[in-house]
Amino acid sequence: MNRQPRKVKPVRKKRLPPLAIALIITVVCAIVTFYFALPALNLRNPDLYIFLCGCMIVYCIVVVIAKGMANELMDIRSVLRVFKKFCAVPFFIGIGLVLVLIVGNIASSVVLQARAYSKLLPVETGNFAEEVKQISYDQIPMLDRTSAQRLGDRKLGKLADMVSQFEVVNDYVQMNYKNQPVRVATLAYADIFKWFGNRAEGIPAYIIIDMVTQSVEVVRLEDGIKFTNAEHFSRNINRHLRFNYPTYMFATPHLEIDDNKHPYWICPKIEKTIGLFGGTDINGAVLVDAVTGECTYYQDVPNWVDQVYSAELIISQYDFHGRYSGGFINSLFGQKGVTVTTDGYNYIAQNDDVYVYTGITSVTGDQSNIGFILVNQRTKDARYYACAGAEEFSAMNSAQGVVQHLSYVATFPLLLNIADHPTYFVALKDNAGLVKMYAMVNVQQYNIVATGTSVAECETNYVRMLGQNGLIKEVPILKSGVEGIVKDIRIAVINGTSVYYLLLDSNEIYYAVSAVESESVVLVNIGDRVSIQAPEATGDSAILTATGMERLND
């Protein structure tokens, strides 16, 4: 008797329920998104609400697809019906997050909080002649950002061991290094393959551009920079900050150097001070060692740090102050006392700090300034100086008009104190972007324009013009036969010309002697006796341009 074989029932594989599938996919998507987007886990951060809404949407969509209900999503009503049926909790959480975003932004808006916004930047009125000292020539930045970039790129191109592996990042942050204005530029890997080949050692150097002498230095490090914004994965500076400070909101990090030329990332901590999302301000900064990645938060940053408050943040806060001090309605209709900043800004080195300068004009948009502000980028100490005169672009046009036959282009001006007069200082560049001349324009009478091939010559001509127009009583006169023994010699190449700076034992002034005008200066050594013709020193002048020089040793 033959037996029939028993039928074996197939074993059904257990499938994960749709809710579990949706949860797993949502968590994976959230982790990947967080790793790249890096939202701060802070209730005052709008990006956090957008991130969480995105997670709710992903969960709902996956649940609907897993339950085979995707074909029922025909219109808005059907979407709402299906979502409420199968994923009501995350759906209503998402609605709640959207409502918080909307209500939070309305409650934080300048329409309702105009007075609070106007107080973000406390501004005091100052006296220009007393508070803004006349700085010496060795502290006047003669390069703008574009010229500094050109010099930095050119320097890297001469370094055979770096030019093929790295490129200069166009940040060029301005700071004071030992009371000298400089710009610091970081390097980045040229491409992903260069990153693979060099990441173990890190980036070996950074670049310093002296904005006075126009010299460029490549600072090589014993241990390379491991943490930069050009890195990937955990050594990316933004990701490194987020994993160490998950609840902090940060402004854009920038690189500065301490007094020992060690690089640090300065990462200002953002705080929202008005309503839920409004009133962006800074409360201290995290300093990250660019080599080791060590992080330290300072509410009061060290004195060598120059930029905590960005120029853009300072200008936006002043615009709130100028527009809304009289209330929101007044900013639209009466506009009594409403002022705004002009279209440009620049930096001024003062007392080993960096200040943002920008002009202040009326809201009607005329072509004149009613004053200007100087704001310390480390402390946010703000001073307003009333001074009616030309706005910056009018001054630039005046300077260009004097040398229009040369077709030079003026850079955005610096504001200087020359003989107790607010003065625009402008560099004039040729078509190749090289600085060829300098100009000084009186703020209050911008028809007074002086030029020169050096800063010292430009100032001498400018002070003479102030005297000729009756703005100052004493005009420096030429002084012949300043004799002394040379105790220090420094050399700089300016616009292709060698300039020798001689310090005599008779005073503490460096005399700038051009090799073109006095060829014998190339033969001068320390200890030689010389006679120099130069203008009388004005104010705190530390460098004077000599009109002639004679060696007395022979």
Image: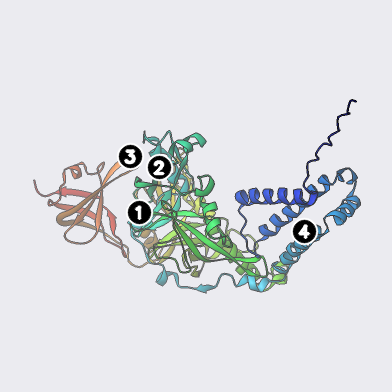
Query: Observer-nearest residue: 81 or 120?
Result: 81
Q: Earlier in the sequence, mark 3 or mark 1?
A: 1
User: In the rendered structure, which amino acid carries the disc numbered 3?
Assistant: Gly
Residue 408 percent across, percent down from the top left: 46, 43
Q: Which residue is mark 2?
A: 201
Of circles 3 and 1, the one toward us is: 1
> Does residue 115 appear in this view?
yes
Q: Which residue is mark 1?
A: 261
Q: Residue at x 74, y 65 (%)?
A: 100
Q: Tell me the element at label 4.
A: helix
Q: Residue at x 88, y 51 (%)?
A: 76
Q: Quadrant of the C terminus?
A: top left
Q: Where, by quadrant of the figure, is residue 475 drawn? A: bottom left
Q: Tell me the element at label 3.
A: loop
Q: Residue furthest top?
A: 2
Q: Which residue is mark 3?
A: 496
Of circles 4 and 3, the one toward us is: 4
